[in-house]
Image (cartoon, grey):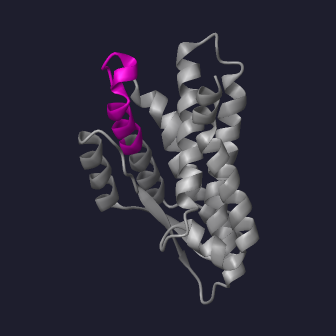
Amino acid sequence: MVNFTSHEIRDILISMLVIGGVFAYVFRNINQGDFISLIPVTMVAVGFGFVFHELAHKFMAIKYGFYAEYRLWVEGLVLAVITAALGFVFAAPGAVYIHGQYISNEENGKISIAGPLTNIALALIFFVLIQFASFSPILLLICSLGFTINSFLAFFNLLPVFMLDGAKVLKWNPVIWVITTGIAFIMMAYPYILSYML
């Protein structure tokens, strides 16, 4: 059974609010400069992607019998606010801390890939919803941002760089890493490929 502590729930809510706020600020021009009313949109489209990514790590770690807890990273949230003020967002709102005596490469790889796979799944859900969202500008905006940001999050986190999920997945299974990274890259590049073809 998955349990959440009160401070873990607090950290998740703060992370979502800050992430929603900084992305709303950066994307405010698509909403006539009113970033406050854009915050609920970005919390759904972007905040869920960040938080669900981390929770996927938590659920997979617990499945293997490890203790896992989401913790807010204040420095990462401050960095998100600073970069948003500069016109872009680099966000690391928090991370899941896993405790166990021994984690094998396979367990570590599967725990790590759970996050990007969640972003891929969310991106696909948003992509499907785009096809039915033309009647509502707000819903279309949520789905478009959700697809774009989750595709990027999946690809970025699969980069084989120390501390990112990709390094652990690659160490566990290079074939799965190549396939998953390829899917994430195609999804991330899809809007650009489509606009080039048109």
Residue positioned 59% across, 13% down in the render = 136
Mostly what secondary structure, the magenta segment?
Answer: helix
Where is 149 relative to 37, above or below?
A: below
Residue positioned 70% across, 70% down in the render = 110
Give the image location of residue 50, x and y in percent. Answer: 51, 50
Is 158 part of what is drawn in magenta? no
Residue positioned 65% across, 43% down in the render = 187
Q: Nearer the viewer, residue 12 or 122?
A: 122
Q: Quadrant of residue 169?
A: bottom right
Instruction: Look at the image and tell me whether residue 108 can be seen.
Output: no
Where is 93 relative to 167, above or below?
A: above
> How many marks overall?
0
Residue positioned 70% across, 58% down in the render = 180
Give the image location of residue 167, x and y in percent. Answer: 57, 73
Where is 55 relative to 162, above or below?
A: above
Is 31 part of what is drawn in magenta? yes
Going by the picture, which residue comes out furthest to the top?
135
Q: Nearer the viewer, residue 73 or 141?
A: 141
Give the image location of residue 142, x and y in percent. Answer: 54, 27
- On the rendered image, what quadrant is the N terminus found in? bottom right
Q: Is residue 100 left or right of residue 128?
A: left
Magenta residues span 18-36
Instruction: Look at the image and tell me whether residue 139 can be seen.
Output: yes
